[in-house]
Amino acid sequence: MKTNRFFFLILIMILISCEKYNDDKISILTTLKGESGVTYNESLTQWNKLKNINGNSYIYQTTFVSWTGFSSITELKIEEGIVTSRVYKEFNTNETNGQQEIIDTYTETKTNIGSHEKGANPLTIDDLYNSCASEYLIVDNGKNTLYFETYLDGLMTLCGFIPDGCMDDCYKGVSINSFKWVD
């Protein structure tokens, strides 16, 4: 009998902690606002409205910039909800003249999407919203600074976190710096 009570007590503790975790996650999705004043849930709703109006074909870019002078741009083209191309450019800053110099580049098409390791993962905006909610906004906000930003139309531009105390190239998450609809 004592064994059954012990396991029952453990089960209740697990269920309570899961409920608290889910409540915290839901709270972040409905309360975390950037400068635009838009929450994750509001942005996701707006994204689905924009997709219904404009179709599910678009191009977006994401960048990475390091304090060391290294940077990269990945451009993804999505047609009818499917990634159809990924273009990657990698740069280093010339220390003499300050100019960005291309040091690596590639283009992938439908037949070889994802064949290169460098660059942003070949994900749709829907995928990015999913990873935002399931990977980035669920981290411990007591140990990390959370970020969520949108364009004026509500489309997510930034979703991620920086661990507290981290100094260089610490941001983990989604960063969209350019977006346009295509026919």
Image: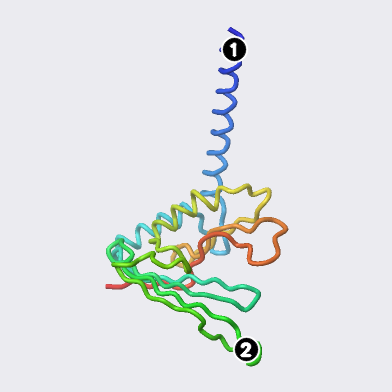
Tag on residue 119?
none
Residue 99: image x %, image y %?
58, 89
Residue at the (57%, 81%) spot, across then down:
92
Tag on residue 98?
2
Residue 123 as seen in the image, left or right of residue 63: left
SS of the residue under disc 1 = helix
Q: Quadrant of residue 113?
A: bottom left
Furthest toward the bottom, the residue is 97
SS of the residue under disc 2 = loop
Vertical position of residue 131 compared to residue 99: above or below = above
Residue 32: image x %, image y %?
57, 53
Residue 121: image x %, image y %?
44, 63
Figure quadrant of the C terminus: bottom left
Question: In this view of the protein, which residue sits in the foreground, 92 or 64?
Answer: 92
Question: In this view of the protein, which residue sits in the foreground, 137 or 87?
Answer: 87
Chain-order first, disc 1 or disc 2: 1
Neighbour tally class for label 1: few under 14, some 14-19, many 20 plus, Cα within 10 Å:
few
Residue at the (47%, 62%) spot, across then down:
156
> Which amino acid lies under the numbered mark 2 shown in the image of this protein?
Gly
Residue at the (65%, 74%) spot, across then down:
67
Figure quadrant of the N terminus: top right
The colour scheme used here is: rainbow
Residue under circle 1? 3
Residue at the (54%, 86%) spot, across then down:
101
Question: In this view of the protein, which residue sits in the foreground, 51 or 93?
Answer: 93
Residue 82 as seen in the image, left or right of residue 156: left
How many marks can you see? Answer: 2
Residue 75: image x %, image y %?
42, 73
> Which amino acid lies under the numbered mark 1 shown in the image of this protein?
Thr
How many angstroms separate mark 1 from mark 2 (CA)? 70 Å
Q: Are marks 1 and 2 in contact (CB under 8 Å)?
A: no
